[in-house]
Each structure stands twice: as structure tokens, then as C-alpha cells.
Amino acid sequence: MSNHIYAVYGDVPELVEKETNQLIDKYLNKEPKDDFNFVKFNLYEANFHQIIEEAMTLPLFSDKKVVLVQNAYIFTGEKVAKEQQQNIDIIIEFLEKYADDTLIIFQVNATKLDERKKVVKVLKKQATLKKVEQLSEQEMKQWIHAYLNDNYKDIKQDALDQFLTLTGIHYQIIMQELNKLLLYIGDRPTINLEDVKAIVNRSLEQNVFLLTEYIQKSQKAQAIVLMKDLIQLKEEPIKLLALITSHYRLFYQSLILSQKGYSEQQISKTVGVHPYRVKLALRQARKYSLETLLDKINACAEADYQLKSSYMDKVLILELFILKL
């Protein structure tokens, strides 16, 4: 195993980048990156022979050197165009024989590696793997406070709670909405609840949670208005139904596991979703019986069949589906 090959992977590119930069800073002993000690490749564009050549070339005017390989799709199940494909045998040989001091970092934008592939099996033996997890709800709150403090701002607790209710735990959405808030409040030092309500958009996922909540409370009129608003925003009926179905399936899975004594964290790992989603799911799931949730999942399957096979207006099919739930 080489101490100088790393693979950093996760589904939030910004967090993968942050982890990568920490590895580079530590290896270079915080020496600034420049053309003499840092070389970056994009595997969609580069030939791996170039990467090998750079890895084997001694650094100039520096004691250490880093080669970063971005978009290392070869370790996932992603399919690429023929001209972007790499010679996997050459990569495997490089991983098995590499023994130089140059630090090699593969960045993989995926939640998991494709362990069926020989190249991944070799990578696991020869490299140090670093999986970058989504931030927990508490970690995200701490990060938001730190980000705002860096901009000499703060946020009230009720505003922060409402903010996460609208955005969910999605790094990119949170960054986008935080920057909008900073522009909105201008010179004011503190973000309050009214600011959040005025400027922050509810994410699609959170809108679907709200839609299912309307259905649970028999507020069908509000559910249909929300559904039509989402369609006005160019969301496809079949996509909305798929999201509603996935939510009810998550409610069902979470409720079963909760009744078996699983904690929110254990449920999260078992079903493969963020703990914050499990927390929201259980909040709604506990208002149903397992039989009722199963009926709703079956109703979703019937509506899906209608959407894909009927000549009826798709918005009308979705509207009737919501009224029947």
C-alpha cells in the first residue's frame, strides 16, 4: 500500500474539494500551491499517460509535489463517451507499482465506489480512501453560524430553524440561499425570521414533504395548489409523483425500523438517506399505520401506471390522485 495515493469521494463537490484542500495543505506543510508543486488534471479530458508522466517527474524548486485527478469516474459506474475512456489495465498497473513521494489524489463525485470493478478493488488495497459524508443537522447549523460570522453576520435561532425547514440539509441550496440573505439584509448584522420568510425559497424536496403533510391533514385544496405551483415552475407530473412515492416509501421504511427499536441514525444508515430526512419522515410517518402507508404506496404505483399509459391530461391525473389519497 502506498502512503501517497488518496481517493476522496462524496456527493457534495464542495465538501470533497474542502477535504482535498486539507490533504494538500497538510502534505505541503501549508506551503502555497504553485506550478512547481501542484498539477491538476480532469479525467474527462486528460489521458492517464499524462498523469503517470507527471507523477514520475520530480518537482522543481520544491521538496514536495501534488498531482490532483478530478472527476475520477473510473472508480464509479459512470459511462462516458468513447474518446474519454481510459486504459484500465494501465491504471491498475500504476496503482499496484507506484512508490514515489509525489502525492496523488483522486477526486470522485459519488456517494460510493463501484466495488465490482477490479480497479476499485486495487484502489482499496493500494490507496487511502476518504469518504466525505453530508453534514449532520447540528454540523450544518454550526457551519452556517461560522459562515455568517466570517461575513460579520449572525442569525437568530428561530430564523435558522425556519431556514433549514425550507432548504433541507443540502449544501449547495444552503449556500445559494445564504448568499441571497446576505445581499438582502445589507448592512444589518442579524438575519431574523422575517428575512428568511421573505427571501428563502422552499426546496423541491421540502415542498413535497409539505405536500404530503397537507394530504395527511386532509388539506387537499392546499395540496393541489402547491402541486400546480410546482408544475408552473416546470416540474414534470411524473417527477412529482416519483418524489411523492419516494417520500411515502421512506415513511413506511422509517416507521417499520422505528417500531423495531432503530434510532434515527441507524435508520439513516439502513435506508441510505440523510438523518435529517429520517427525522422529518418519522414526524409524519407516526401519524399513519403501516397498512395506510402501504395503501398510499400502492395508490402511487397505480397513478404511475396511469401517467405512463393513459391519454388523459397528466396534471389532471395527478390532481385526481391527490384527491383520492
Image (cartoon, rainbow, N blue to C red):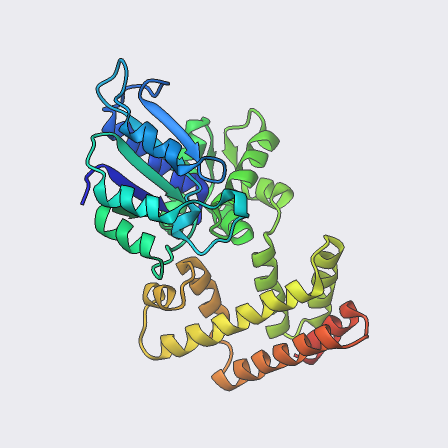
Q: In the rendered view, does 260 fall on the left or right side of 102?
A: right
Query: Count the marks: how many?
Result: 0
- Residue at horizontal 43%, vertical 76%? 255
Q: The N terminus lies in which quarter of the figure?
A: top left
In this rendered view, identify the residue nearer to me: 46 or 136. 46
Residue 277 placed where, x, y %?
46, 61
Q: Residue at x 41, y 44 (%)?
A: 72
| Residue displayed at 35% across by 62% down | 116
Task: Please state the horizontal and vertical placement of residue 294, each as a whole percent of the image.
Answer: 53, 83
Q: Is residue 246 left or right of residue 239?
A: left
Residue closest to the far right:
312
Name the residue at the top extreme.
Answer: 61
Question: Quick check: 296 above or below 147?
Answer: below
> Can the viewer see residue 10?
no
Name the side, left or right, on which 120 lies relative to 78: left
Q: Camera-side residue: 156 or 98? A: 98
Q: Is residue 307 shown left or right of residue 173?
A: right
Answer above or below: position of 13 versus 232: above
Camera-side residue of 291 and 54: 54
The image position of residue 150, as x and y in percent, is 42, 28
For the residue pair 222 and 311, the one nearer the viewer reads as: 311
- Rendered location of residue 11, percent (x, y): 44, 49
Quarter of the image that includes the C terminus: bottom right
Residue 264 visible here: yes
Q: Relative to 175, is 210 above or below?
A: below
Give the residue at the far bottom of this rendering.
291
